[in-house]
Image (cartoon, rainbow, N blue to C red):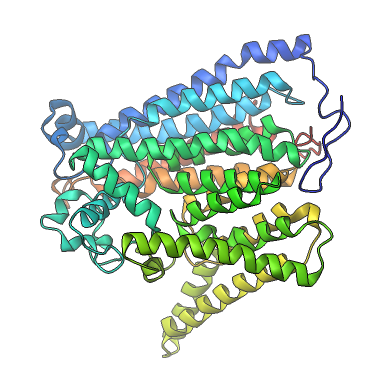
Amino acid sequence: MTTPESPTGVGQRPDADSPVRDTPDQENDFHDAWKPLTAGLVGSLLLMFGSVGIGWLAQSSALWRNPIFIWMRAEPAGIVISVACIAIGGMVLVRAWLRLGQRFTDWPPASGRIVKKAILMWSLPLMVTIPLFSRDVYAYIGQGRLMQANLNPYVNGISALSNWFNLGADKLWAEAPTPYGPVFLWIEQFVVTVSGGNPELSVFLFRVCSAFGVLLCVIYVPRLAVLHGVNPNRALWLSVANPLLLVNFLAAVHNDALMIGLAVAGLYYCATKRYIFGIVLITASIAIKPITVILLPFVALLWAGKKASWPRKFLYWGMTAALSLGIMALLGWINGFGFGWINGLSAPGSVWIWYAPVGALGLIVASLGSALGWDGWAITGHIWDAAKVLAVGIVVWLAFRGSYERIIRRMALAFAAVVLLSSMIQSWYVVWLIPLFAITGIRNDWQVKTLYFILSFFMIYSISDQLNVWPYLQQQDAWINLDSARLAAALIALGFAIYVVFVDRKTRKLFLRTEHTTLDVI
């Protein structure tokens, strides 16, 4: 059988196309895979059930009149049960994912079918949960209504709508312009038009869009992995079956799913020399959320070719920019908003968060500066600006330096620099990076251990961060309120994580033993 040459310059291994036969031991592993598959399904079902009590509901939702929802949301016992279900369910899903990965040693073809089955089984309950860990989806509904009312979402916040508070969106969106691109504005308008503004149907339709993004990842992550000589089944498990991706893209209904799905699909077509179509897909990703503009300099290098001279590289950088910019200009002309999305990049939300390295540094400097009588936060602002400049510098440096064979890896590192040097890091920002690193290889040493710890940390944080506990349960003399619910969720999740890392004989070896194999290779 002829071994195809990888269009990215990374040749496949000589045995990449030869069938990998399943040994009797592997067949036993496949037979036992029902255990983590079932455990993950139980975890997803617990998340679904817990969302009834503390998931985000729009104030206008008819579900508020449902007796089950009333009890789960209005009675302290219902809140306690919901918190326990969310915390246990999320961590059970993490453990199931870890145990599924332990089932395979060399990830033969049959493992890919099992990973896809896991993605399907674990995703289905999340498709019908009340939104968890974020209520941005209700801001999507509001922006769709702005489009319906012929108001410019790049100028108007959702407070321009009457009764906007009943939409269920965070008040931070009240005056904030949308940070999303023109394609997503049309999706928002379409969803609101089809649903008639019904919040439950709107949420489900947005979830369908997110599920399409996940499906694109299922299709194209393995294909890109093969081009890099990386085992496609392990790459699929590391990235798309990852609970952090499923929870953020489906349970939280983030439009980042569609953004990343289109970006990964575009990368595949660029890597297989269908550059125009690939750049169009990546531009569509930018027209969902503009952050994926970071990919363009690197796909231009793929287009320029392996032995491109510097004049040729600059030519293709210009051609790629002109093609993408032209498409965005056309979209802006059609919707009449032009490049208004640039104004929307001052996205709502916290400016910093304590676990982001740059955010933590800023807090320390602000505190020390204020203690000395200076304007500490002004100094911190300059530090954050410097970090952004440094991030841009790293992206430029990675675009100019490095081998052709590692272009997509350089792209992943550039994306990581932008995320890590931000003062605000959300869990879904981390999810942007996982597919890019998975398709270019995550070694079974400190690299995959880092992913395990990052997954565990962000799952614990997400579980305890955003809980919809209503104000009438937050009286000072109440034994259950928002703070106590968050603390309980954090303690349950943290306790489960300690068990997985230090006590569980099956999983602790993943975190504590030192191993080095090449499980990421075909």
Task: Return the x and y of residue 521 as percentages of the image width and height.
Answer: 79, 36
Task: Return the x and y of residue 13 as percentages of the image width and height.
Answer: 86, 35
Q: Nearer the viewer, residue 464 or 121?
A: 121
Q: Residue at x 18, y 31 (%)?
A: 69
Relative to residue 186, is residue 494 drawn left or right? right
Relative to residue 468, is residue 301 drawn left or right? right
Relative to residue 359, is residue 254 drawn left or right? left
Q: Residue at x 57, y 74 (%)?
A: 387
Q: Nearer the viewer, residue 433 or 78?
A: 433
Q: Quadrant of residue 421?
A: bottom right
User: For the view shown, which residue lies furthest in the right direction?
Assistant: 14
Q: Quadrant of residue 235?
A: top right
Q: Quadrant of the N terminus?
A: top right
Task: Return the x and y of residue 484 as percentages of the image width and height.
Answer: 29, 46
Q: Quadrant of residue 338?
A: bottom left
Q: Residue at x 80, y 20 (%)?
A: 19
Q: Residue at x 61, y 41 (%)?
A: 452
